[in-house]
Amino acid sequence: MISGSYYRFVIASEKIWKGLPERERRVLIEIYGQDPQNPMRVMDIILRSNLGSQATIHAALTNLQLSKHLKLTSYKNNGRTKFITLSAKSTSLFKRLDQLIDTSIKL
């Protein structure tokens, strides 16, 4: 049986991510990595081919919005342009992952 700290980290992080499919996790990570002062537009994330097809990414965004992981807000001058921000639920998820990493590093 494997009992290393990396293995414990992986198991614990999987519990934090529980219920989110891999593609939705990757979309959240991409959004989390953006500058909060310069919010990402929906089109910015849809054009990232490393995440899948446009339709697949759009479906992931819709699921993340329905599960309250993301907020989409319309640009005041153009209602078709939508900006993506992480919700409190996603921010909490990333804080728990940060704490898990900090704990694993100290071990």
Image: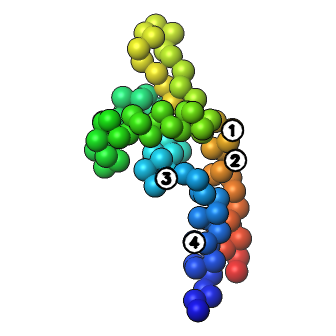
Q: Is residue 96 above or below residue 90?
A: below
Of marks 4 and 3, which one's residue comes earlier in the chain? 4
Number of dots carrying numbers:
4
Within 10 Å of disc 2 (Cα), the crowding (few <14, some 14-19, many 20+) is: few
Which residue sits at x=35%, y=47%?
51
Q: Amino acid at mark 3?
A: Pro
Density class for disc 4 (Cα within 10 Å; few <14, some 14-19, many ≥20) is: few
The residue indicated by pointer 2 is 92
Where is residue 12 drawn, in percent x and y? 65, 69
- Identify residue type, mark 1: Ala
Is residue 37 among what the camera can see? no
Q: Are marks 2 and 1 in contact (CB under 8 Å)?
A: yes
| Element on which disc 4 rests | helix
Secondary structure of the residue carrying numbered label 1: helix
Residue at point 46%, 36% (across, down): 61
Q: Residue 98 versus residue 70: which sits nearer the camera?
A: 70
Q: Is residue 83 left or right of residue 105?
A: left
The residue at which mark 1 appears reads as 88
Could you say which disc has been placed on residue 21 in the image? 3
In the rendered image, residue 1, in percent from the top left (x then y), is placed at 58, 92
> How much space separates mark 2 and mark 3, taking CA atoms?
18 Å
